[in-house]
Amino acid sequence: MSTKYKTQPRKIYYVTLTVVGWMDVFTRKDYVNIIFDSIRYCQANKGLELFAYVVMPNHLHLICQTGERSLNDVLRDMKSYTAKAIVDAIAANSQESRREWLLHLFEYYGRGNSQNKNFQFWQHGSHPIELYTQEVIVQKLRYLHNNPVKACIVTEPHHYLHSSAHPDRELNIVDLW
């Protein structure tokens, strides 16, 4: 792995996880819940500290850090688990109108990659950006929370349900200040 994308414990990073082909998967609450459950598991068992998040239809942004563990390792494990769980959930969902199309595309993306056996759900990498000053943290926090507004999903950041900006957010976050 390039040193450009290596993370260090106890440093705050802005990361992005993107579905292959930018496919809108997180339009269904069941699939978002898999992400939330995995993040909760990583918070409880892997030392993930979450400061902010947004789950968009085809990607998610996190501002986070880890204690002793490598953030890269925590994200790798989270991506591995959620990829399998979401693909399995799609395959088992008889109400999923896009089921065959989505499964076909996950298989297509997986075929071109020797690291995958049957499918690929996430694009490779998380492109961590170290947030080394308060100014950079504020910039990324605003970008993250305004992502649903820019995508014309909501008119105000706090209206978006799958975001730390929402007053009834579903994940526990650590106060940055």
Image: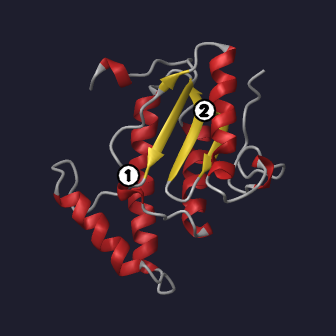
Compared across the picture, whether 29 is left or right of 117 comes to right
Compared across the picture, whether 116 is left or right of 52 comes to left
> Residue at left 23%, top 58%?
110
- The answer to whether 46 is drawn above or below residue 104 in the figure is above
Secondary structure found at label 1:
loop
- The answer to whether 132 is drawn above or below residue 29 in the figure is above
In percent of width and height, residue 53 lies at 64, 42
> Residue at left 68%, top 17%?
135
Judge by depth and name the residue closer to the eye, 79 or 28. 28
Name the quarter where the N terminus is drawn: top left
Judge by depth and name the residue closer to the eye, 56 or 37. 56
Amino acid type for the residue under numbered disc 2: Ile
Mark 1–mark 2 CB contact (< 8 Å): no
Quarter location, residue 174: top right
Q: Residues within 10 Å of mark 1 (few under 14, many from 20)?
A: many
Residue that carries the numbered disc 2 in the rendered image: 63
- The answer to whether 51 is drawn above or below residue 6 in the figure is below
Farthest right residue in view? 167
Cα separation, mark 1 vs mark 2, equals 18 Å
> Residue at left 65%, top 52%?
148
Which mark identifies residue 122?
A: 1
